[in-house]
Amino acid sequence: MSEKKTRYSDEELEEFKELILAKLDKALKDYEVLKANVTNSEGNDIADTCPTFKTLEEGASTLGKEEAGQLAQRQMKFIQHLKNALIRIENKTYGICRVTGELIPKERLRAVPHATLSVEAKNAKN
C-alpha cells in the first residue's frame, strides 16, 4: 500500500528552482528590452528622420510604445509570478494545487512553472 505524495521532494524542488531561475533571468532581460523600447533609451526615434515623415513616424512610434508598454506590464506580472513560485519552493508548498490540495503534475509545472492550479481545477474555474 503506497501513500499518496503530498509534496515534492527537496531534490524535485531544486530541479524546479533551477528551471524557474533560468526563466526568471530570461524574463528580466526581455523586460529590460521592452522597457528600453518604451523609454526610447536606444535613441532611434523621430528626431533623426526627415520632417516629411515626422508625422507618420510619431504615430507609429506612439503605437509601438503603447504596445511595448503593455508587453512590459505583462512581462512584469510574469516575473512576479515566477518570484512567487520561488517563495513557494522555499516554503515547500510549490506544486500543490490551491483548489484541490493535490500535486500538480510535473509535466504541467515544467510547461508553466508558476502554475498554482492543476489543469482540472483551471478548467473547472473557466
Image: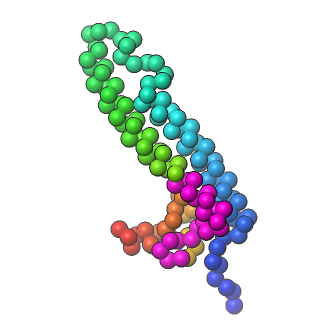
Against 114, is 126 above or below? Answer: below
Residue at image location 54% in from the left, 76% down from the top: 101
Quadrant of the image occupied by residue 47: top left
- Residue in the picture at 44% in, 24% down: 40
Quarter of the image containing the N terminus? Answer: bottom right
Position in image of residue 49 (x %, y %)? 36, 11
Q: Is residue 99 above or below residue 69?
A: below
Left or right: residue 102 compared with residue 56: right
Q: Is residue 8 magenta?
A: no
Q: Position of residue 58 (x, y in %)?
A: 30, 21
Per the rendered image, the range of residues in magenta is 81-101
- Name the residue located 64 percent from the left edge and 53 percent from the top edge: 19
In x, y percent, where is residue 44?
Answer: 43, 18
Q: Position of residue 46 (x, y in %)?
A: 36, 16
Q: How many marks?
A: 0
Q: In this rendering, does residue 101 appear at all?
A: yes
Q: Is residue 118 rendered to the left or right of residue 110? A: left
Q: Is residue 66 above or below residue 92?
A: above
Using the rendered view, name the quadrant where residue 2 is placed: bottom right
| Position of 59 relative to 111 (above/below) | above
Q: Quadrant of the C terminus?
A: bottom left
- Front residue of 113 and 94: 94
Is residue 111 shown to the viewer in this render?
no
The answer to which image quadrant residue 85 occupies is bottom right
